[in-house]
Amino acid sequence: MRPLKELMDLRGRVALITGGAGHLGSAMAEALAELGAAVAILDLDPTACQERAAAIAQAHDVPSLGLACDLADEAATRAMPEKVAQTLGGLDILINCAAFVGTSQLEGWVTPFAQQSAETWRAALEVNLTAAFVLTQAAAPLLAAQGSGSVINVASIYGILGPDLRLYEGTAMGNPAAYAASKGGLLQLTRWLATVLAPRVRVNGISLGGVWRNQPEIFVERYQARTPQGRMASEDDIKGAAAYLASDLSAYVTGHNLVVDGGWSAW
């Protein structure tokens, strides 16, 4: 049998992480770089991409690349996997982490259902779901050629569960229908792709619970009381999940949704 150290070794592999300059994307990029992977950081802000890529390269002595891209631009998005392969020598791992989230300052987003707009619905699906489809489609031949391709789609507990709106009472926070629908769609896309791209490419999802972001105290208290682990998630909680699904530790795992929610969905 291969030792665990060998199964988790990502040296010689290349990963593309969308939303890689953000909290979660950056954490997953760090995890893969720690295991030896070269990493490409894709995000909207060019400066943030370059700075994050440079910091990872310096900290972990791995090749890196910063790529700025608006995921709503299909042509630009579709070109990203080939750019990564040309610069870093291939593509083994694709992490679709970028998301149109509740902090987005658009009218008709974090409002009661009756006021949620079709415009923000379409914007959310474009970034959270359509971009993952486009990137995976473009990356699939590259991932298959490497023989150990892994796609990780970062979803949410709200892709599998309905929201408890009582959590948000008395705060400016909300839970838009478009976010839930896009994440649910991403999980079904994960299952669909797992069968279509097998056996040379594995496709799995990570459904993360609420991540602590200095939310209002009353929200945090309610969330923690609702969670068996008694806390919200942190960036560290997604690192192990990403390392597992990206590496040969999960070589016989595909079409799976790894729920990392502190037990939120257990009761």
Image (cartoon, rainbow, N blue to C red):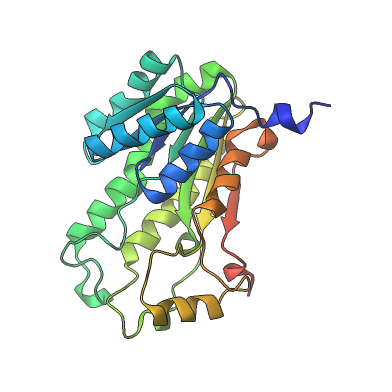
Q: Locate the C terminus by quadrant.
A: bottom right
- What's the residue at 64%, 27% (across, down)? 9
Foreground of the two, 203 or 23: 23
- What's the residue at 60%, 51% (across, down)? 258
Is residue 48 something one can see in this rendering?
yes
Foreground of the two, 247 or 111: 247
Q: Locate the N terminus by quadrant.
A: top right
* Above or below: residue 93 compared with residue 12: below
Is residue 196 something one can see in this rendering?
no
Q: Give the image location of residue 203, x and y in percent.
A: 54, 38
Left or right: residue 107 versus residue 2 is left
Residue located farthest toward the front when viewing the structure as drawn: 58
- What's the residue at 63%, 40% (across, down)? 244
Kindly indicate the quadrant of the structure image that contains residue 194.
top right
Kindly indicate the quadrant of the structure image that contains residue 247.
top right
Total count of labels: 0
Left or right: residue 130 versus residue 24 is left
Q: Give the image location of residue 158, x and y in percent.
A: 45, 64
* Above or below: residue 220 compared with residue 72: below
- What's the residue at 31%, 85% (across, down)? 170
Q: Give the image location of residue 109, x and y in percent.
A: 23, 66
Q: Give the image location of residue 162, x and y in percent.
A: 46, 71
